[in-house]
């Protein structure tokens, strides 16, 4: 899957990710400012989350209720060591069967499950992004 989008068609980009989810763990990589939180927020809205969706940069994890159950959104940017994720019970979350969206997953690489969906966000210009899946 590959799609170029901006804020006017972010709904379609999010829908494409939703339609292509094969596991409950979804890794979205990209540089700072690429729009990882923005697309995850839009995905959550499309999954029926009614709560205000915010970046989990300081809390590390935000959990929302969707029409199909809990959705966990992780941001591991601030972690210094992969084992810090164990303090929040990351393995239990990832094994829970609930949808988990992960930003900065490279920070917890040893604790990722063997199977997960992997997407990359690329900044094309100030308003345009490309999202594409990585075959694993």
Image (cartoon, helix red, strand yellow):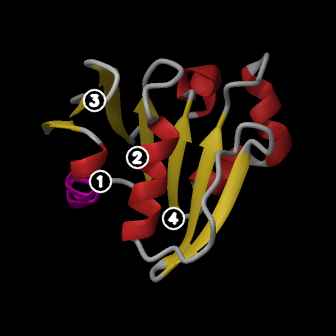
Q: Earlier in the sequence, mark 2 or mark 1?
A: 1
Which badge, 3 or 1, comes first in the chain's sequence? 1
* Residue 19 position within the rendered picture, expressed as x and y whole percent measured from the top left: 21, 60
Q: Say which residue appears at 31% left-offset and 21% top-offset.
A: 122
Can you name the residue that lies furthest to the bottom here? 67
Q: Is residue 117 above or below residue 23?
A: above
The quadrant of the rendering that contains the C terminus is top left
Q: Quadrant of the N terminus?
A: top left
Percent position (x, y) of residue 70? 58, 71
Q: Residues within 10 Å of mark 2 (few under 14, many from 20)?
A: many
Q: Secondary structure at mark 2?
A: helix
Query: Is 118 rendered above or below residue 79?
Result: below
Q: CA distance from mark 4 to mark 3?
A: 30 Å
* Whole-number angstrom distance, CA of label 2 to CA of label 3: 10 Å
97 displayed left or right of 28: right
CB atoms of marks 2 and 1 within 8 Å: yes
List the residue tagged with mark 2: 39
Q: Specify start and end residues of the magenta stretch as a single range.
A: 11-22
Label number found at residue 34: none
Label 4: how many Cα within 10 Å (few below 14, some 14–19, many 20+): some
- Seen from the viewer's position, the closer of residues 125 and 42 is 125
Return the residue at label 3.
129
Q: Nearer the viewer, residue 126 or 58?
A: 126
Task: Report the residue marked by disc 1.
Answer: 14
In the image: residue 48, left or right of residue 82: left
Residue 16 part of the magenta segment? yes
């Amino acid at each position: 899957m590959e799609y170029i989008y901006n804020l006017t068609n972010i709904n379609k980009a999010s829908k494409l990710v939703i339609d292509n989810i094969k596991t409950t763990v979804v890794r979205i990589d990209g540089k700072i400012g690429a729009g990882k939180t923005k697309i995850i927020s839009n995905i959550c809205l499309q999954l029926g989350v009614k709560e205000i969706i915010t970046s989990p940069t300081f809390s590390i994890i935000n959990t929302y209720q969707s029409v199909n159950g809990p959705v966990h959104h992780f941001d591991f940017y601030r972690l210094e060591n992969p084992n810090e994720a164990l303090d929040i019970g990351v393995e239990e979350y990832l094994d829970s069967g609930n949808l988990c969206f992960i930003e900065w997953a490279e920070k917890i690489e040893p604790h990722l499950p063997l199977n997960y969906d992997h997407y990359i966000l690329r900044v094309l210009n100030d308003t345009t992004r490309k999202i594409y899946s990585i075959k694993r």
